[in-house]
Image (tube, rainbow, N blue to C red):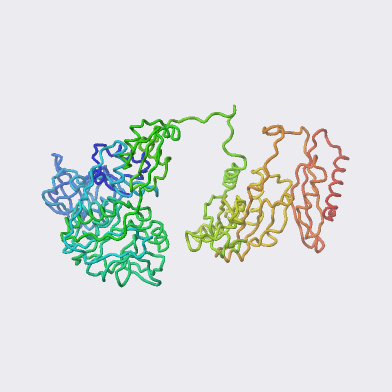
Amino acid sequence: MKFTLSWLKDHLETDATLDVIVERLTMLGLEVEGVEDRAKELAAFRIAHVVSAEKHPNADKLRVCMVDVGDGKDPVQVVCGAPNARTGLRGVFAPPGTHVPGTGVDLKVGTIRGVESRGMLCSERELKLSDEHNGIIELPDHAPVGASYADWLGLNDPVIDISLTPDRADCAGVRGIARDLAAAGLGTLKPLAADPVPGGFPSPIGVTIEAPDACRMFVGRTIRGVRNGPSPRWLQDRLLAIGLRPISALVDITNLLTFDNARPLHVFDADKVRGGIVARFAREGETLKALNGKDYTLDPAVLVIADHERAESIAGIVGGEATGCTEGTVNVFLEAALLDPTLIARTGRRLGIESDARYRNERGIDPAAVIEGAERATRLILDLCGGEASELVVAGAEPDWRRSLTLRLDRCATLGGVPVPAEEQERILTALGCTLAPQEHGTLSVVPPSWRADIHGEADLVEEVLRVKGFDAIPATPLPRLTAMTKPALTLKQRRTGTAKRLLAARGMSEAVTWSFLAPGVAEAFGGGGEALRLVNPISADLTVMRPSVLPNLIQAAGRNADRGYPDVALFEVGPAFRDPSPTGQDQVAAGVRAGRAVPRHWAEKTRAVDVYDAKADALGLLEALGAPTANLQVSTDAPAWYHPGRSGCLRLGPTVMGRFGEIHPAILETLKVEGPMVAFELFVDAVPLPKKKGGTARPLLQLSPFQPIERDFAFLVDAGIEVDRLVRAAKGADKVLVKDIRVFDVYTGDRVEAGRKSVAISVTIQPTDRTLTEDDIDSLGQRLIAAVAKATGATLRS
């Protein structure tokens, strides 16, 4: 919501400065997103007079101008390339040191083709006034030399941009904002003149409401003999300041009142209306060419304003081109309607139409100001366009919006934490438009105003009082300490999300944040896509199903990076995946993908593509950081179908699947239109068991052995189908005290090994803890290790 300071002061009598107003607006809950102060931005630009303009000695298209800048000193030399630079011209001068907003350049004294230039004469584009840059600005002869150009042009009116919450429909108009500021003590709200305009004749156009639940009230009148030319300069400047393009006086008047009083209106060319006006639902297949230039096919769920032959506008959202006002319009029919907000919001979303009228109608219009809005519009039309107004035509009736609430005067203290005197509570509520009546036992009967549909109960009244009083008046009261030592705000389970993100980022991966929705076909490829997880109101036609896995979005993101010249990418995301719509059907998943080269091209290293072991290393590293007992994990080969069979696995702790890893199946990459190979992992963060507390929460003491560790290598011959992991586990189980670590350093298949067999070489680290091992101890351990591996896998020691 944008408005200018002078516009605000049309409704608010105040001496407050811009900074005070901006601060108070934010304190009132009307958050100021920005202030555009053109006077400050253009403060250095002055009106100047070109005393002489001579041809540049070294350039045909340049002029050397001597410019009087009105400071009483000698003229300033400026080199100018504009074709209209000439002697006697009055333009806009910028001295050295000025920041030019249209180009972003800070001016300096320079030399152009051997001639010094001490400033510049500016075009409109350089001052961000328009796109005109074919020449410098030309001002009339009466423009005062030396004066501020912004002040002379009337650009010293700051534009304030506030962010509205959906419940504050009243502040979608400047008057509502002024009312809040007046209640906060920043001035006095000026009375709003809305004297009825007497009708000179009966309206030849009548109004009928065929959908009373959708259109509660319709007020209209015919105005004949108007002149629809350009609107006056003050009105054009006001609309331009907030980003609206002036069109014609009639249209500009309706736009002005939309922003001034949150009262959307519409004017029809009365000579193009066939018969009377009807508020009805559209007929199946009915079409409308709207004022935005688009054609819409309507259905019976869309409320339209029609004549006796066709739909002429989509009610509350956009008008139709057929009855739009043009320069040739002589007679108009003015519309002010009270419409169902829910219907307007639903229609706007379905048709994809964004308009200022929809923005206000879907939030709710003041039900008591429909006639008032029509009268204000009539007065402006008569003042600016002339003509004669008919009597009002009223269909429907003002709904019963009045509701009486009870406010206990002590609730500001007991509920809000701030004791506010009864007199001040009454003053604030009265200033906001409420009607008060005292009751017994320290209570008030409060009737909220018609424009505040968001006030429903006593807590809302307390909030209004405290909002205007100032939330900064609420004292900061610490919560009572329940224990001697503070407890962490997050549990270990909650902290794991941050831990996972830090660990994956430390492994060189970049975090991605993607949608939790997928296209149905993609979801089906990853085991989802059921009706139970289909969205009723999706944000996009290709994002209609809750994701069963985080991987599809990451794979597609990696593909987009590759399409833009970044094929070597590593992405991760920690977020939800959905199995079913139940409260327990959501998993917190840490997932990642790697694509392209695992080792960058380098003269000293051999490059290679990413493979399944990169994904496995990421998964195991993350599980280790999360506190999972990685030494007890088992690797199975039953990964889901979106992984490549034989190049993937599941990490299990007993029957529980902790995670999955592997190369993405080529068919999946083809479905997602992504080049491979690509590897990925998925870890279920909530499946990682919490550590068991033994003897408190302190870390166990570091146990270091004073004895030298021993390494022994073993090479086993085993069937090619036996997983190496089984062999390693069997070797570790031979002696869990002495065997500290086992590493696989060679796997061989070839002509030196019989067919169907493979050679697996492992390095075993033996760490004595209480004495130095003898040779017999080491040999005994080796025999136990060989026997354990043979029993578990059928392996034999390779000679």
Could you tell me if residue 593 is visible in this image?
no
Q: Is residue 513 left or right of residue 189?
A: right
Asked which quadrant contains residue 12, the reply is top left
In the rendered view, would you say 26 is above or below 480?
Answer: below
Q: Nearer the viewer, residue 671 or 98?
A: 671
Could you tell me if residue 696 is visible in this image?
yes
The outermost residue toward the top is 484
Quadrant assignment for the C terminus: bottom right
Count numbered badges in the picture.
Answer: 0
At x 31%, y 59%, the residue is 396
- Residue 581 spot, x, y in % from top left: 59, 55
The outermost residue toward the front is 440
Asked which quadrant contains residue 145, the reply is top left
- Residue 580 spot, x, y in % from top left: 60, 56
Q: Nearer the viewer, residue 467 or 721?
A: 467
- Residue 484 spot, x, y in % from top left: 59, 27
In the rendered view, would you say 552 is above or below 274?
Answer: above
Q: Nearer the viewer, residue 576 or 150?
A: 576
- Residue 624 spot, x, y in % from top left: 66, 44
Q: Nearer the viewer, residue 360 or 120?
A: 360
